[in-house]
Amino acid sequence: MICGDRRTFSFFLLQWIGVEAMSHYEGKREAPHRQPQRDGGSAAPRREGGQQPRRRRRRRLGAWGALLYVVLVIGVSALLAGLGWIWAGDVLALNKAEITATITLPDDIFTYTEETNEEGETVTVSHADVGYVADQLKQNDIIEYKWLFKLFCSFTNGSEKMTSGTYTLSTTMDYSAIIRNLSAKSSARTEVTVVIPEGSTLKQIFEILEENGVATVEELTETAANYDFKFSFLKDVIPLGDATRLEGYLFPDTYIFYQNMDPVQALNKMLLRFDEVFTEEMREEAAANGQSIHDIVTIASMIEKETTGNDQTDIADVIYNRLYNPTSETAGYLNIDATIQYILPERKEKLTAEDLAIDSPYNTYKYTGLPAGPIASPGQASLRAAMNPSGNGYYFYALGDDGEHHFFKSYSGLTSFKATQELYQNG
C-alpha cells in the first residue's frame, strides 16, 4: 500500500503536470482581432472619389490552424505526462534495476534549531543538508533526479527525519523508504562487530573503534572528557575535562556497533556492560571491605596488565600486602612495571633506570600506594581477583625461564630465585 507521503506527492506531481498543460493552452489563446476605431467613433476616412480604402486580404488558417493548435497542445501535454510518469517512477521506485549502495551521512551536514512542539515544549530539531544527501544518492545511482528528491523532502519534512550514520540502501526503495532508512532507528544502518581485548587502554580502544568506522579518536576523546555519563561508579573518578576519567571502565568484550555511530552511544554501550559485569553483590562486598569501585578497578587493571595466566589472585595478594604493610621490605611501593609502560609513549621490552624515575602519579616505583587511576580495562577474572586475593602472604614475584610467574614472601627468596634463572644473568 502506498504510504501517505508518496500518495500526496504523486497527486501533487500529476496535478502540477495538468495545471502546466492547461496554463500552456490558455496562454496560447488570443482575443479576436478588431479594427481599431478613430477618436470619436467615426469610420476610417474615404479616399478621393468617395470610395472606401481597400483592405488587404488576410490569409486565414481556419480549420487547419485549429487542428495544428490542438495537435500542439496534445503533444505538449503528452510530453509532460510522459515526464510525469518518468519522475513518478523515480519517486515510487518503479521498473528500476536493483542496485545496493552504502551511504554515509556525517555529523557536519546537520544543523540544529530550537522549536516548540505541540505540547508547548522547546525541543532541538536536527536538519540534514538535503542537497548533500541528494548528491550522495545520485552518485551511488539510488535516485535519478536530485531536484525531485529535494522537492519531495520539502513536502515531507524529510530533512528532520534523517540522522548521521552509515546506511545500506537500494534502488528498490521509494523516496519515503529512503528517508525512513536514513535514520537511527533504521535496520539499514551498517553494523560492525568489534572485539575489545582485555587489558586494552583507553587510547587503544579508541583506535580500534576508529579502525572499524564507529567514530573517530578525536570524537571519542572529546566525548569521554566532557560528556556526563550517568553511572554511579563514575562519581569518584577524575572530574569532567579529562578523557582518562573513563580509563578502566570501558569493559572489554565483543560488541556490535553501527558505523558512524554517535560517540556517546558507543561509549555508553561499553559503560553499560561494565555496569552489568560489576554486579550489585560485588558492590556490596566492596563497600563492606571499605573499598571504592575505583580502587578495585585500578588494582584489577594492574593485575590484567601483569599477567595473562591463572595467577591473578596471587598478583592481587602481592599488591594488597604491599599496600597494607608499608613497613615491610617493600615500604609501600608497588613497583608494578605495567604502570611505567602506561606513561611511556611506546611500550618497551625492557625498562631503564630513567624510565623508573619518571615523575608521574602513575609511577609506582616513585610513589607509594595506588597509581592515579586504572591503567587499562580489566576483564571479569581480574576484577574478581582484585576482590579476592589468594592470601598466601606474597610480597614479590618474578618471571621464570619457564614463562611462569614465581611468588615469594621475602626479597631474599626473590634474589635467590633470580640467580638460578638465565633470564636474569645478563643484566
Image (tube, grey):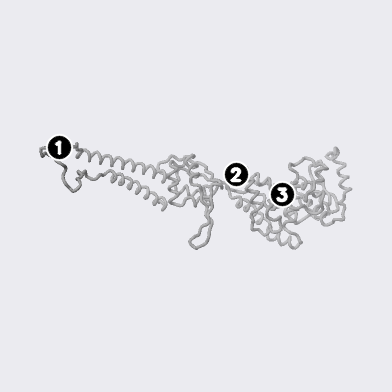
In the rendered view, does 118 fall on the left or right side of 289? left
Sequence-earlier tag: 2 or 3: 2
**What residue does disc 3 label?**
376
- Location of residue 182 in the rendering, given as x and y in whole percent from the top left corner: 50, 48
- Cα separation, mark 3 vs mark 1, equals 109 Å
- Location of residue 100 in the rendering, given as x and y in whole percent from the top left corner: 49, 41
Dividing the image into 4 quarters, which one contains the C terminus?
top right
- Location of residue 271 in the rendering, given as x and y in whole percent from the top left corner: 65, 54
Residue 213 — which label? 2
Name the element at disc 1. Answer: loop
The kind of residue tagged 2 is: Gly
- Location of residue 268 in the rendering, given as x and y in whole percent from the top left corner: 62, 53
**Toward the viewer: 177 or 70?**
70
Between circles 3 and 1, the one closer to the viewer is 1
The kind of residue tagged 1 is: Arg
Name the element at disc 2. Answer: loop
Q: Is residue 379 visible?
A: no
Q: Is residue 417 visible?
A: yes
Sequence-earlier tag: 3 or 1: 1
In the rendered view, does 78 fall on the left or right side of 197? left
**Toward the viewer: 92 or 390?**
92
In the rendered view, does 105 fall on the left or right side of 278? left
Number of dots carrying numbers = 3
**What residue does disc 1 label?**
54
Sequence-earlier tag: 2 or 1: 1
- Cα separation, mark 2 vs mark 1, equals 88 Å
- Cα separation, mark 2 vs mark 3, equals 22 Å
Q: Residues within 10 Å of mark 2 (few under 14, many from 20)?
A: some
Kindly check if marks 3 and 1 are in contact, taking CB atoms under 8 A apart as contact.
no
The kind of residue tagged 3 is: Ala
Kindly check if marks 2 and 3 are in contact, taking CB atoms under 8 A apart as contact.
no
Q: Residues within 10 Å of mark 1 (few under 14, many from 20)?
A: few
